[in-house]
Amino acid sequence: MGYRLESDSLNTAMSLASLLTVLLPPPQPVEVPTTEDWRAIESLLGELPADYKAFVERFGTGKINEFILVLNPASKNPYLNLVREMEPILSALRELIQSGEPCPFPLHPESGGLLPFGKTDNGDALFWLTQGEPDKWHVVVNSARDATYERFECDATDFLAGILTRQLRCAVFHESFPTGPAEFAAVSPRQ
């Protein structure tokens, strides 16, 4: 179980605003989803958290501190696209569960299941725990190297802000992360 960062009383603007105090968006974000993109993705997955949508609209496709990638439904790169990367991440977990590895949470599309929204360069996965209303979904981080699951009682942008300011510590990430100031680097679309 991760450390608590209280966010239930924060609205989306405050949540994103806290992240923007430590992480600047690129001047020209790439692959910003359109209204049609959001309609298509939400018709497939259901409503997504407003803080996530605001983040992707403000930052586009990119990498945080050369380590964390937030999946973008508008990315042309299949490894950075929310829909295309979702199934390989969940399939890998399903295979591990079938081989006996414990998982304390159901997986999407089960009710309250884990739904991936990001990943790290180490192969760790960042999930929403889809319990309740989307704007109340908490974050779960799963280690790529073992069956460690760490739950954070906050939304995605509060999680990112907390990790980048070291107000939150994630046992799955290396203890030295983040090194240096928070940076977001846009990732060009893969052709």
Image (cartoon, rainbow, N blue to C red):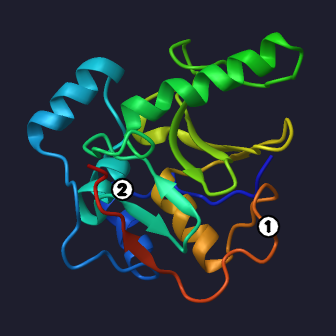
Query: Going by the picture, which residue comes out furthest to the right?
Result: 100
Q: Is residue 55 left or right of residue 112?
A: left
Please tell me whether residue 68 is drawn above or below residue 113 in the rendered image. Answer: below
The residue that appears at 17% across and 36% down in the rendered structure is: 37
Q: Is residue 162 above or below residue 39?
A: below
For the point 67% across and 18% down, which residue is it?
106
- Amino acid type at mark 2: Asn
In percent of the image, x 59 and y 24: which residue is there?
Answer: 90
Disc 2, SS? loop
Q: Nearer the viewer, residue 128 or 30?
A: 30
Q: Find residue 159 and report its horizontal and vertical position in percent.
A: 57, 59
Label 1 neighbour load within 10 Å: few <14, some 14-19, many 20+: few
Residue 49 circle label: none
The residue that mark 1 highlights is: 174
The picture places residue 9, in percent across and down from the top left corner, at 46, 55
Which residue type does callout 1 highlight? His
Image quarter of residue 47: top left
Q: Kindly identify which numbered label has been placed on residue 11.
A: 2
Residue farthest to the front?
191
Residue 43 image offset from top left, x and y in percent:
24, 20
Left/right placement of residue 87 relative to residue 16 reads right
Q: Earlier in the sequence, mark 2 or mark 1?
A: 2
Q: Position of residue 115 (x, y in %)?
A: 52, 30
